[in-house]
Image (spheres, helix red, strand yellow):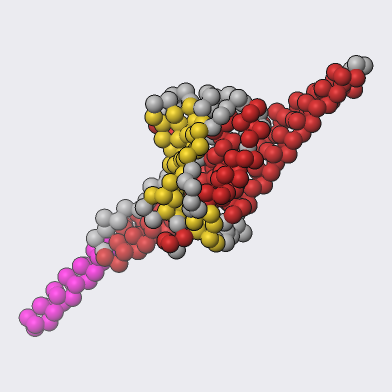
């Protein structure tokens, strides 16, 4: 008889414990469900509370939190991507509108002008604006291609010294037009690197163009061997450039000056950097004693 009563007491206690356990689980599941409802209805972006007494529920909440984190990260990345696209479109629209408006203006003037020489002058200026517009469009397409997965650069043995000399010679008229006599320090012997000829030419063209655009009168081009590679330095005299500005100079559409330079979309250094990185090189900037410098490091052939 006593044993029956003892068994009933044990069963009652077990039943009560089980009921309490189930009630506790229900409360915790309800709390998780409430938090999930809030998240789904976007009333909150907080993660689930994982301080639960049940290990299974705690593990389940942790897994849900990981999913929420990844979903939120994807949402933020998408917002940033859309914002970047809008900014790019705004920059492109502004850069295209400037020479296009000027070109239309000068063509309109030439149409009304009776004097032949003045008419020819207006047409020549309009042609220059058209060429500037074409250069901008080429830069936009080049930026788009470089940023795509389709851009695959094949590397071969190249004489960097020869390419630099050729590009400096091709830029002679630009130096003359800006009354600049560059100081050139190049070795007498070949400097062999592992690179892509078209990409290297584009890099040097962009560095020279940037130096000419922002120089206050002096430009230096220096090439030397450093470590297991080659170091190219392009300097130009410049007004003071802060560290904060220098951190942005390789960004798309960035200009060191608040004034936009005609024909320049702020893509030259961005394109140069991307091409350098795709060839296993590195690039940085420096400012010292009134001279702004772009320092490029490229792998030598022996470092292949």
Using the rendered image of the protein, determine whether residue 117 is visible from the camera's viewpoint.
yes
Residue 160 x, y percent position in the rendering: 52, 51
Furthest-front residue in view? 188
Above-or-below relation of 287 to 233: above
Residue at the (30%, 61%) spot, across then down: 58
Above-or-below relation of 268 to 16: above
Foreground residue among 11 and 129: 129
Which quadrant, please, contains the C terminus?
bottom left
Residue at the (45%, 35%) spot, across then down: 293
Residue at the (49%, 47%) spot, across then down: 188
Residue 297 x, y percent position in the rendering: 44, 48
Furthest-right residue in view? 114
Viewed as shown, does residue 302 lie left or right of 12? right
Q: Residue 13 colored magenta?
A: yes
Give the residues drawn in magenta, as a range: 1-26
Q: Residue 143 colored magenta?
A: no
């Amino acid at each position: 008889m006593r044993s029956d009563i003892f068994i009933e007491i044990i069963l009652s206690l077990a039943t009560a414990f089980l009921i309490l356990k189930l009630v506790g689980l229900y409360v915790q599941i309800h709390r998780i469900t409430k938090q999930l409802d809030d998240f789904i209805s976007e009333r909150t972006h907080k993660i689930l509370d994982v301080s639960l007494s049940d290990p299974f529920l705690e593990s389940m909440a942790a897994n849900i939190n990981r999913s929420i984190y990844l979903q939120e990260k994807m949402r933020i990345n998408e917002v940033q991507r859309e914002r970047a696209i809008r900014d790019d479109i705004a920059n492109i629209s502004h850069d295209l509108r400037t020479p296009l408006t000027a070109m239309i203006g000068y063509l309109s003037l030439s149409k009304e002008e009776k004097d032949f020489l003045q008419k020819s002058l207006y047409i020549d200026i309009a042609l220059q604006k058209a060429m500037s517009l074409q250069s901008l469009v080429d830069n936009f397409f080049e930026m788009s291609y470089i940023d795509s997965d389709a851009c695959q650069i094949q590397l071969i043995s190249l004489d960097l010294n020869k390419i630099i000399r050729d590009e400096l010679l091709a830029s002679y008229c630009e130096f003359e037009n800006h009354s600049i006599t560059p100081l050139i320090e190049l070795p007498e012997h070949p400097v062999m690197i592992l690179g892509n000829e078209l990409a290297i030419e584009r890099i040097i063209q962009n560095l020279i163009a940037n130096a000419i655009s922002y120089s206050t009168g002096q430009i230096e081009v220096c090439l030397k061997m450093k470590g297991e590679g080659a170091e190219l330095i392009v300097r130009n005299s410049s007004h003071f450039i802060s560290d904060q500005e220098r951190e942005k100079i390789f960004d798309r559409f960035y200009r060191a000056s608040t004034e936009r330079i005609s024909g320049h979309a702020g893509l030259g250094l961005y394109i140069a950097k991307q091409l350098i990185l795709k060839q296993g090189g590195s690039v940085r900037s420096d400012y010292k004693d009134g001279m702004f410098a772009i320092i490029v490091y490229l792998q030598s052939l022996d470092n292949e």
